[in-house]
Amino acid sequence: MREKVLRYIRERQLMRAGDRVAVAVSGGADSVALLRVLLELREELGIVLFVAHVNHGLRGKDSDADQAFVADLAREYRLEFLSVRGDVGEYARQRAQGIEETARQLRYKWLDSKACEHRLTVIATGHTLDDQAETVLMKFLRGAGTRGLAGIYPKLSFGFGVPMPFFSSTFSGASIVRPLLGVSRSSVEDYLTALGQAWREDESNLDHRFARNRVRHELLPLLEREYNPNIRQVLSDAAELARAEEEYWNVLAKRELETRQRTKAEVPQRLKPSTSTPGGGAAEAVPFQNSAAEPCFSLVNFQDLPLALQRRLLRHFAETRQLALDFDHVGKLLRCALGELPKAELPGGWLAVRQGGCLELRAPQAELSFSGYQYSLPVPGEVRIAELGTTVRATVIREQFAHKSAEVDGLLRAELLGPELIVRNWRPGDRFWPVHSKSEEKLKRLFSEQHIPEEQRQSWPLVLCDAQIVWVQGFPASRAFAWGGRGDAVKIEIR
C-alpha cells in the first residue's frame, strides 16, 4: 500500500515538499486508510498533515460518534483537527435538491474556507479505484460523453476545475487530490486489518434506495461475476483514457474557440450559402436583439472542421454563457450552426440564432418594471436581480490567482471596495471611465459606440461603490478601481 500510493502521488505530482495537507476523514475505511498511509509517507514527502471532518448530521448519534472517532484519531497522532457540523437534510429541503449533492456542496464550501484560514495547499480525499469504477459506470448509464467518462480526477483545484457551490464567493486555489484512486477497496481493508486499525461503518452505504449503492452492491458484482472479473480495473482504465482525450481536445478546442469568439461587429456577415439549407439559400434571418458587443461565434469555414471538434466548440461556446447542453441540444445547435435550422431553442429559454457569419446565443428576456431596480451586493457574495432573472456575484480572488484570470481588465481592486456594493440599472446621465480609455464618457455614448440596442439600455446592470460606477456589464473595470496586479481582486459576474 505504502509504495503503491507513493508512486501514484509522484507520478501525478499530487503533492510536493512543504505542502500543508488536510486529509478529509469521514471515519470510513477509505479515508482512515488514506490518513494512515500519509502518516507513513509524510517525512518522505515533506508534508504537514491536518485532519478535516464534516458532520452532516444525517444519522443522529452515529454521525456524532463518527466525529468523535475521527477526533480521537487526530489526537492520537497529534494532528490539528478541523471539524464542522451542519444539518444537510434541512438545507437540502430548503434548496429542494438531493441529499448527496447538498452534502457535496457543503463539504466543498467548508473545506475551501478552511484552506483559506489555515493556508492549506492540498485537500486529500479517500476515493478509491472502486469509487472510480462506480462513477464511470453511473455516468455511462446516464448517457455521458468522454467528459463524464473521465470520472474522478486525481487532481483538481478550487476555482480552477472544481465547480464551487453556488453560495460560495471565494476560493483558496488549494488542490483536491485523490491518492488512493489506484487502490481497490478490498486492498484498503486488508491494509487496515494488517495495521489493527479500526474504522467506522456507515449503514446508509447499504441503502439500495441510492443509485450508487445499487451499482456498488448489485450491478458491479453482477458484471464482475458474469462478464469480466477485472471490470473495476477496466472501468478505471477507461476513465484514464477519457481524461487524456479530454485534455487533448480541450486544448485544441480552446485554441480554436479563441479565434472564433468575437463580437458581432467583428464577424464577416456574408458566408457562402449552406448546401444544407433548403433551396441552397441563406438561412432565414432573425431580427438582431443582442448587443453587437455580446460574444458570438464565427462560422467562417466551420463546416470544414471535423465533426468531433464542431461539437466540442459549440459546447464550449455555450459554456461561456454558463449554459450546459446535453447531446440532443448540442445536435440542435450544430444543425443551426451548419444552416439546417435558422434558430435552435436551448435549455432555460435560451435561443441560438444563425445570422450572417455568426452564431449568437440570446438569453431569455425578462420585462423590467418602469421603476428600475437597485440591490445591495455583499463582497464577497451574490444577489438575485428578479427583474432580469439573473444573479450578480462578487468573488474575492487571491493575488496569486488573479493573474490567471482570463478577464484581468474586468477585475476590481479589493482594498478600494467596501463590504457592500450597489447593483442597479442604467440611468440617464450616468458617466463611466473604463480602464485604458482616455477620458470619462456618458454611458449613453459608450452604449451607442458598442451598438447596444436602446431597448436594452434601461435594464443594463451597473455596479457602484458609494456613488461611483466601478463596473458595467460588457466593459472593462473603472479606471479608478481597476486591479493593477497587486493585492486581492474582486471579480463581478452575471449568471
Image (cartoon, rainbow, N blue to C red):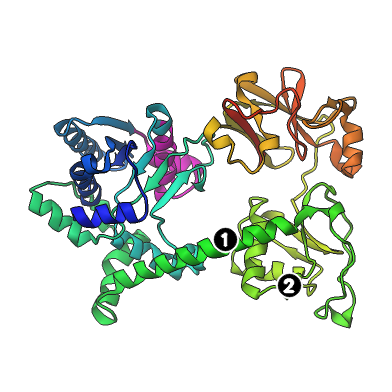
Graded by Cα atoms within 10 Å as few (under 14), some (14 to 19) or many (20 or more), the crowding at tag 2 reads some
Q: Disc 2 marks which amino acid?
A: Arg
For image coordinates 18% across by 37% down, the residue present is 69
| Position in image of residue 385 (x %, y %) | 69, 36
For image coordinates 52% across by 45% down, the residue present is 160
| Position in image of residue 186 (x %, y %) | 19, 61
Q: Disc 2 on helix, strand or loop?
A: helix
For image coordinates 41% across by 46% down, the residue present is 104
Is 94 a magenta residue? yes
Q: Are marks 1 and 2 in contact (CB under 8 Å)?
A: no
- Which stretch appears magenta? 85-113
The residue at which mark 1 appears reads as 250
Quadrant showing the C terminus: top right
| Position in image of residue 197 (x %, y %) | 11, 46
Q: Disc 1 marks which amino acid?
A: Asn
Could one spot residue 266 in this view of the protein? yes
